[in-house]
Amino acid sequence: MPRNLIIVGAGNYWFNLVQPALPKLIESGLVNKVTTIDITEQNPIEGVEQVVRKKEQPLYEVVDKIGYDNPLIILSHANNLHTPEAVDVMENAKSKPKLLIEKPYAINSEDLNALKDLLEREKENTGLLEYYLTMKGIPLLVLGGLVKKDSFYFADKTIIKELTSNALEEQNGKIREAIGNPIYALSETLEGEGSYGTIEHRNLSLVDRILGGGMIQDLGQHSLTPLMALEDYIGKIDTASLKEVKVAHCKEYLDFAKSRGIPKDRTGESYAELKFVTSSGVLLDVCLGKYVEKCSNQRRIIILGTRGTVIYDMTNNILSYQHGDDNKNIKPLLEADKKGAKYLAVLRAGIEYLEGRNPFSFNPAEIAFEAQKIVLNSLLVPPAQKAEYQQGTMHDEIFKS
């Protein structure tokens, strides 16, 4: 039975990610009517009801006035409102909604504890959305045997593309056979291309630490969640796994923050390196940040095993691996297609999870929550090194001096 959808926050997230996916969600019978809630009036969109929320008006009150029974709500507004208003809606809304929350889910320990309680109380009605876990990382999760064969990921041939004949079937669950036991992993989420590498487009919620700003909050879940899902292979990654944190600030980013009245001690980091050791003893390096790589992107996961190496290009979402020393057999195997409505799989996975049809053999809400916990913990760790860098600097040069 399709649910009526309410999107809270009608900004770039709505226009760039949710709106393009709506036709397929409606066609799939998952969504019926659509309403947006925002604090400012939006340009009219055919087939979409738009509601302007008054200042200080409780969100649950706005939701109930719309008149939907058991609606699906997606929270994609200001970072600092995600957990407080999730709790508010689930405790007070008479319409008995189901809820999906965008990252960052919590921006401090108080929010994290409140979110933990909410997920325990409303585990069948609350989920957490994560783009890299449920879309960009899917080929790697297939190799790990973590995507259910009866899920929409296998049924919908437009989401995962086979770049080698019969790769979806032949590579499913074959990570240990392909590269042996894990020795080392690297996760890089480095962005410098186009708008990702531009300082001026940043809103304050991505800069001000009080509002959940900084690149550890912005990119931490992306970098961690696909590997955290591979726990049975590489070991558990949690707060105890974190061994070292380094942070850096782009000088132009600091100037931008200062021009907006944000003091330096409140300006979130623009680049960070995190070192982990998993419960199985696997070393993991995480590098994340923006305004780097000479205005290009470098997003990848590399896993070194005793028999070979996984090479996962997370800009183009293409999986390959090398077995042994024979590099002639390195070829693209699987691709998560991002050419269409790239957020469709994320939204569908979230909806299916809330409807009791989890497409994974793990709980995606638990993975996303634990990643948020690690992210917040890393912000409390005294950095082993700090630095400043010019926009466009290669990431491996930031901590050289």
Image (cartoon, helix red, strand yellow):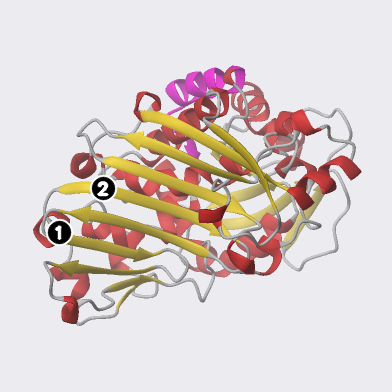
Q: What residue is pinned by disc 2?
A: 184
Q: Earlier in the sequence, mark 1 or mark 2?
A: 1
Residue drawn at the location 38% of the way across and 41% of the way down: 364
- Image disc number at residue 179: 1
Q: Residues within 10 Å of mark 2 (few under 14, many from 20)?
A: some
Residue 117 colored in magenta in the image: yes
Residue nearest the observer in this picture, 315 or 253: 253
Write down the region rendered in magenta.
110-128
Measured as percent of width and height from the top left, residue 343 is found at 53, 61
Where is residue 262, by image quadrant? top right
Residue that lies at the very extreme toward the front in this rendered image: 401
**Dividing the image into 4 quarters, which one contains the C terminus?**
top right
Residue drawn at the location 32% of the way across and 57% of the way down: 302
Tell whether 187 sits left or right of 40.
Answer: left
258 in relation to 199, above or below? above
Please tell me whether mark 1 or mark 2 is closer to you in this view.
2
